[in-house]
Image (cartoon, rainbow, N blue to C red):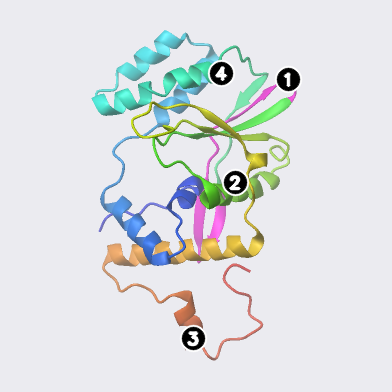
Amino acid sequence: MADLRVPSVQHLARNWRDDPAAIAKGLVKLAIDPPRFSYSPLYGAVRDLLVLGIPYDQVVEGIRKIKREKVRDNLLSVLPLIRDHFAGMTPDFFQMVEKRYYPVGRGLMIPFEPPMIYGVGGQLYFPWFSFWRQNPLAKERLSLFVTLVEEVLLQDPDLENARFEILDFSCPGPKLPRSLTVINAKEIPRVDGPRKVAMLEAFAEGYFKALAELSGRPRPASDADRRAEDSGSDPNQPGLFD
């Protein structure tokens, strides 16, 4: 069976749909034909430029050593934008952040691994890098992502006052080159409690439908089906996401 990896918080948001069946279909497709490259070299490039002060040309040469041409060119298209964004910036400190997990339900724990935090002039910055070339998070999916990340940040006294920024390196239109849009997360509407619960319920159901399909087992019944069949349930028992 194809391996269905547990998605990160941003991949949860990107793959969210109103219909659990549509979520399952998308996750199955990703499991069968996953991305064949990683943007991880770009995180190393950020650290090299921002913290170690390595000359930009040397960072470029490091990326040029990647053998696959399409992957190499994709990463190189982002580097000038990273350089320009952090140009002249000297952080007072820089550190990695320990991985955390967000409970979605049914035992599904979504990993949340911030790439870094850094401080400049007494202000703590928490950047989130979105390297997707097309279809970045937008509208309700972006609101869901920001809502979940904020909940995690508020649990950590060291991060709750950080300036949360999304660095979107996508192309603004067809056949256009990448550009950088810096999004202040404070300006993004949050998803309210009931809507968030419904969205996470849909994702959890879709995830386990995908898991069952990939393992060859019958798809699990939906939450609505289980509630209809379980007439003997305790009405005072909290729901899955309560």
Q: Give the mark nearer the N terminus: 4 vs 3.
A: 4
Quarter of the image that includes the C terminus:
bottom right
Q: Give the mark nearer the N terminus: 3 vs 2.
A: 2
Q: Is residue 68 visible?
A: no
Q: Which residue is mark 4?
A: 86
Span colored in magenta? 101-122
Separation of residues labelled 4 and 1 (CA atoms): 15 Å
Q: Which residue is mark 3?
A: 228
> In the image, residue 108 lies at what x, y percent?
49, 60
Magenta highlight on residue 19: no
Mark 3 lies on a secondary structure that is helix
Q: Give the mark nearer the N terminus: 2 vs 4.
A: 4
Q: Give the mark nearer the N terminus: 1 vs 2.
A: 1
Separation of residues labelled 2 and 4 (CA atoms): 23 Å
Separation of residues labelled 4 and 3 (CA atoms): 55 Å
Disc 1 residue type (three-letter): Gly
Image height of 238 relative to 19, above or below: below
Magenta span: chief secondary structure: strand
Mark 4 lies on a secondary structure that is helix
Is the residue marked by circle 1 packed among few (<14), some (14-19), or many (20+) residues within 10 Å? few
Given this view, does label 4 or label 1 mark the residue nearer the observer? 4
Q: Which residue is mark 1?
A: 121
Image height of 23 relative to 59, above or below: below
Q: Which residue is mark 2?
A: 146
Q: In the picture, residue 217 is in which quadrant?
A: bottom left
